[in-house]
Structure formats: C-alpha cells, structure tokens
Image (spheres, helix red, strand yellow):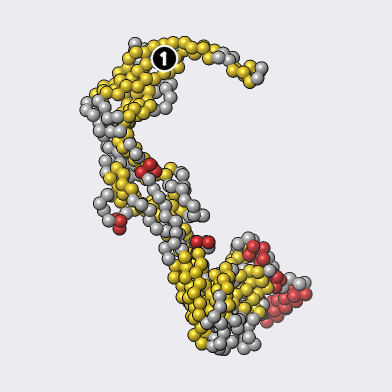
Amino acid sequence: MTVRKRRISLFLTVVLLFVSVFSGNVAVKAGGGYDFVDNLVDGVNSDGTVTPGKTLSIDGQKLENSCSGFLTAYIKGAVEVYWDVDGEKRVPEFDSGVFKIKVRTEDAGKNYCFYVSGYYNEVNYNNNTKTYPVKKGSSSGASQASLDISIDKKGMATVTGKITSGSATFKYLWVDNSGRYEISGTTFTKKFDTTHYDVGYHELSVELSDGSEFYYPKVFPTGIYEKPTIKASNFETFAKKLSFTCPSYKGYNLDCYLQIKKAGEKWSKAKTYGPFSAGVPQSINKLNPGTKYTFRAFLAKKVKYSGKDYWITGAFSNEITVKTGPKAKPPIKSITTSKAVTSKHWVKPKYEGFKLVSEGFWVTDTTYTVTIKMKKKPGVAGIYVHSSSNSPLYQYIKGNKKVYKCKFRVGGKAIGKKATVQVYAKGNKTYGCYSPIYKKKVKIKR
C-alpha cells in the first residue's frame, strides 16, 4: 500500500470515528472486553479491590445506555449476567433495575469478575469487567462467625451458629437472602421446615449486629420428602410388555421414574424408565414372557445451580412384584355358537318437551351364545371374549374353568354369517397378566 493510500485510509477512519461520536451512536453491542462495563460497578474501592460484607451493584439502565438493547435481551432471557468468583458462578439479585450482590466474608482473598453473556437480535452481548480482588478480613475487621446445618428425613432443618471472635451478636438468619428468621446472642440454634422451599440448592447466611454477613461454606439442598406409593393395580402385564400408570403425588413440578429388575436380582442390575406423568399409562417393552419382575418408583427433579444441572431424587416407594403374561395363547379345544335367535323390537320416538327429536323405528338383531371349551383348566382368573360381528366390547368371564359360555347380541340378521371370536386370558385377579389373543372364525347357527 502506498503512503498516499495509507493517509486516505487513516483519514477515513478518523472521519468515521468523529461522525460516530458526535451522532450519539456510541452503544457498544459486540463483545469487546471490559471497557464499557467496568466503570459501571458501584462499591469498588479506589484501589480496585472490594471489601467483604459490602454490596457491589450495577445499574441496568446504565448498561442499557452503554449497550443498546441489553435490558430487552435480558428480560427475554437471551442474556445472562453473573459474577465469577474464582470459577464459581453467582447470579446477582435484580432489584429495582439494579444488579446487586453482597461480597461474602469467606471470599477474602478471592476475585470477583462480572460477566454479560448472550446473543439476541443478531447482536453479541458478551462482555466482562476487570477482576476485583477481595480484601482479607471482614468489613468490621473484628467479628467472625461459623455456621452449620443438618436436615432430617422429613425436611426439618437445624441451624447452629457461633460467634468465634469479636463483640457482635447474631441478628438474622437468611435463606437465599429472602427467607428471614430473627436470631440473637453469640450462639443460636434455629429449626425451620425446608419443605416450604423449592426443591433445589439454597444458600444460608447470617447477619450480625455490626452489619457483617457470613455464609455457610456450602449450599444445602432441599430434598424431595414425598414417597410415592405404588399398587399392583397400577400395572397390567402382557407377554413382553408392561403397562404402568404412575400414581398421583403432591409435589410440584416433579417427575416420577420407575425402576425394574427381575425378581431375585440385586437393584444394581435394575433399569430406570421415565419420566412418567401421573395418571397417564406408559408402556415398557422387551420383557420376557412368564417372568416375575420387581418394581419401585421414585420422584426426581432437575435443578440448576451456578450454571450447572443437578438431579435431586426422593426416597424409593414400596416394592411390587408382578408376572408378565404367558407366551402361549389359552389352551382352547373348540369354539362354537348355538341358540341363535333373530328378533325385532320397537325403539320409541324421542321427545324434548313437545318437540319430536327422533322418530320411532324397528330394529332387527340376532342373539347367540358362544361356547368355549378348553383342553384343560387354563389356571387363570378369567377370560375375555369378543365376537367381531357388530358386537360391543370384550366380555369378561370370571373363573378357572374348562367350559366358558357368553351371550352376544348383534344388529341385523346374522344367522348363517361368520363371526371372528377372540379370546385372551387374565392370569391374575389383581393386575391382569394377559395372554396373547386366540382368534377363530365360527358360523352363527341355530
């Protein structure tokens, strides 16, 4: 490039920059380091450090002014904001248009860095601030405290605290900076019910009389304390398939899962299926016929904390053992029909008040009896029988018999016509255990 061309290029760059500045179009939309965010952080010391116990805040409107479209993108969930504290992601509170986070006392010696991350409406909003080191020592320079928490199987939490140095006393116990409990003294024990909180991870902190705040070193999870109950009536088994209806449960936004193993095996060999919605039948396939399986259910929820996904699971339900249906069809020897009778009957007209809705008419139908003989007693709770000649649903006949009889009524003159009779067995009174279907065409005769 010649000297003249270089001068022209430099001149155009200066002109474009001049026009951009004086036209008011100075919003930085693309990711470009920490320049446009850095000077918007309030609460930073003059030496570039931050003090434990103090609050760092960033005005959302100022971010909008420096980065046009930011608030719209944030409200729509396209942009994420968080503080990175030595690799731990912490989401600030967004209150009255201001992003706020309180520097923890135990973060002394760590580093805070604010991030904006996201892409919306063809604009890249990725940016971050400089790193702000946290001064060692609390804001008061005196009082220190320790915390501990334990949660029992019913979700009752017991929190204990102790002032380890300084003259301050305890004032408040906080859960996620929203659930507040009054406490006092240099030591305390406080119990509360965690089942009132959403299933997930929560932060525990205390506030001292001198304004200092101390956090429990680890987040604590609120669990799923509801235990599902399953019954044999929730199951229907076929030769190679299971139909399962998940029981209802009280938990909000929880998922139900089912574990299955062969009876006698260890649970380490079980397979997990789900999630299942309460009251909705689901199928599990590829099972072995005539085999006993043991089931148990549990509730679970996927939660997010510090940008990561975690699974929280509840206690296992009671165990149920059921058997899949037999591989073979019922041992039928013969299927015959007899006593077929054709008749007419009058269907009366229908009125609504004095208004005729439908006129009366004559109906012709045929009634006949199906007789099913078994080679031997099938060893079942009963059988289902269906005749396809315009008949209604399957009829169920209870009992373990060698001969079964059932009566059908079909529309029209059916004598001399053929009907497909279908039979399958129910092997268990409680949950089904159904066999494959046996089909045979028979002639309807007198």
Residue positioned 30% across, 36% down in the render: 427
Specify whether residue 354 is in view.
yes
Q: Quadrant of the N terminus?
A: bottom right
260 lies left or right of 227: left
- Amino acid marked by disc 1: Thr
Q: Residue furthest left?
A: 376
Give the secondary structure at mark 1: strand
Q: Above or below — where is 319 with respect to 48?
A: above
Q: Nearer the viewer, residue 81 or 178?
A: 178
Point out residue 241 in the picture as x, y percentages from the top left corner: 34, 42
Q: Nearer the viewer, residue 104 or 118?
A: 104
Point out residue 313 in the picture as x, y percentages from the top left corner: 42, 59
Residue positioned 26% across, 53% down in the render: 265
Q: Nearer the viewer, residue 67 or 337?
A: 337
Point out residue 412 in the picture as x, y percentages from the top left corner: 45, 14
Q: Quadrant of the C terminus?
A: top left
Q: Which residue is mark 1?
A: 366
